[in-house]
Image (cartoon, rainbow, N blue to C red):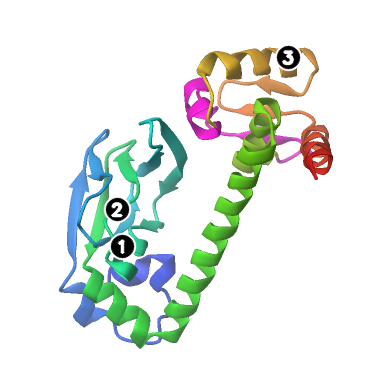
Amino acid sequence: MGRLAVFPFFKDAGIDLTSYESRCIWRRFDANEILVDFDDASTDVYLLASGEVRILNRTQSGKEVILGEMRAGEFFGELAAIDGVSRSANVTALTRGELCVVPAAVFREIVFAAPPIADRLLRLLAKRVRMLNARLMEHAVLDLRHRLYAELLRLSAPRPGTDGERAVSPPPYHHVLAARIGCRREQVTREFTVMAQEGLVDRTRGALILRRPDILEARVAEALREDA
């Protein structure tokens, strides 16, 4: 099995990827290295073999908003490879790692040659559009408190061995959460103080625990209904 087939996106492609691999470049990166910047003219697709990166967007006033993080097995840069338009986001490494740089022409050839991969790409793009639509709606209609609830629920995963609790691991920094939901760090800190007093959240050594995610979900749903 070739190196490209290691990535979930390229598994069971139905075609031989060997000839495409020779046209890709593998390289390592360091923490805090900018891999893609706003308005870059490059159109390559980047496959993360190891490490973690953060994707940022920037408002017209220059304020940066965190769109999310990606880890090994995921990829970014597909939009520029599809339409050739300059980059709309910044991608910065959070850790050291390695990636595979796939030229746009190679990426498109693989997608057109392999129906299973084309189907995966369509589904992935649809998933990302739905997620962005949800966040856009939250920013448009929810106040700071409920945007924070929604973001914590999105970042969390079920906590094994508990009755419905969820956990965010590692625990997110307040300034990172602030950049995700479009507010100041101090505002996030105040909201966490209130949530802790209500018994909704707790912090352990390695995670932020959502003790009552059901209450957070109900509050977000109620806020959305009130706006409607």
Image quarter hosting the C terminus: top right
Q: Amino acid at mark 3?
A: Val
Closer to the camera in the image, 84 or 24: 84
Closer to the camera in the image, 149 or 21: 149
Q: Nearer the viewer, mark 2 or mark 3?
A: 2
- Residue 163 visible in image: no
Q: Amino acid at mark 2?
A: Arg
Is 71 rendered above or below residue 203?
Answer: below
Is 112 rendered above or below residue 9?
Answer: below
Q: Earlier in the sequence, mark 2 or mark 3?
A: 2
* Residue 22 lies in the magenta stretch: no
Q: Which residue is mark 2?
A: 87
Q: Earlier in the sequence, mark 1 or mark 3?
A: 1
Residue 4 located left or right of residue 67: left
Q: Amino acid at mark 1?
A: Ala
Q: Which residue is mark 3?
A: 194
Is 81 rendered above or below residue 171?
Answer: below
Tell how many labels: 3
Task: Tell me the CA gap for discs 1 and 3.
Answer: 43 Å
Graded by Cα atoms within 10 Å as few (under 14), some (14 to 19) or many (20 or more), the crowding at tag 3 reads few
**Residue 55 is drawn in which quadrant?**
top left
Q: Which residue is mark 1?
A: 80
- Where is residue 97 shown, x and y percent of the image? 28, 45
Q: Nearer the viewer, mark 1 or mark 3?
A: 1
Name which residue lies at 78% across and 40% down: 227
